[in-house]
Amino acid sequence: MKVLGLEGSPRKNGNTEKLVKAILGGATEKGADTKFYKLVNMNISLCLGCFSCRETGTCVTQDDMQLLHGEIQSSDAIILGSPVYMWQVSGQTKLFMDRLVPFIKPDFTSRLKGKKRVFMVFTQGNPDEQTFKVYFEYLENLFSFLHYDVKGTMVATGTRDPNDILQQTDLLEKAREIGKNLVA
């Protein structure tokens, strides 16, 4: 089994990255092959909205999304992590999400090879886990519409400083267990 970790925080080794890597660590413990990509370090351009990819399955923009499209197709599970900025995912994460259109045919059926499991991880400075609940549900619905098998969402609250997640040992352990369960 292959588990792909995609993380959209501009912070190096910040809370979101640590949480995504904890899930990947759990998956590795269960024997999965894992890969991690930090979206901010990749060349991902804006979607041009030309929709030629809906017909062909291939984006006309040549950048690092071709690599990620291949990684998604060869993965069984995907961990998508982002901090919450202004009630939504980071800009880097949004660019990535917009470029998933090639996986949808004109009739809205999927080009994905098999049902891809998706688990989403969010970090937020706000201490109230319910604050952005509607947005997280929206994203779960979006990925379900795109034919991914959404396995859930984890939210780490009160994560303003880059190492705040390290104080949430129970959440880090839960993340490792999620990784193990994705492989089971």
Image: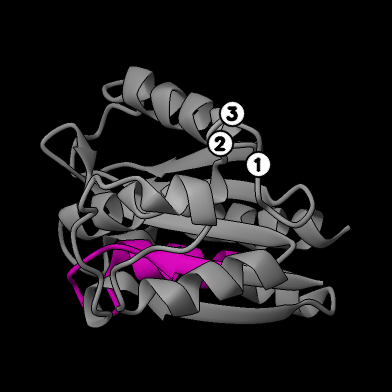
Asked if residue 21 is among those painted magenta in the image, a careful observer would answer yes
Nearer to us: label 2 or label 1: 1
Where residue 32 appears, as percent x and y from the top left, is: 78, 76
Amino acid carrying label 3: it is Asp
Mark positioned earlier in the residue sequence (2 or 1) = 1
Residue 110's disc is 1
- State the residue lying farthest toward the left: 86
Task: Using the image as rendered, state which of residue 55 and residue 9 is in the foreground.
Answer: 55
Q: Tell me what residue is drawn at x 53 percent, y 57 percent.
A: 57
Range of residues picked out in magenta: 5-23
| Local secondary structure at mark 1 | loop
Quote the CA–CA distance across marks 2 and 1.
7 Å
Q: Earlier in the sequence, mark 2 or mark 3?
A: 3
Rendered residue at 20%/66% (across/down) = 45
Measured as percent of width and height from the top left, residue 49 is found at: 24, 45
Residue ID at (28%, 80%)? 42
Q: Are dots 2 and 1 in contact, CB under 8 Å?
A: yes
Q: Which residue is mark 3?
A: 107
Three-letter amino acid code of the residue under disc 2: Leu
Tell me the kind of residue under disc 1: Ser
Percent position (x, y) of residue 174? 62, 52
Q: CA distance from mark 2 to mark 3?
A: 12 Å
Of residues 54 and 118, which is closer to you in this image? 54
Marks 3 and 1 sit apart, C-alpha to C-alpha, by: 9 Å
Q: Is residue 4 magenta?
A: no
Q: Is residue 48 left or right of residue 30?
A: left
Which picture quadrant has residue 29? bottom right
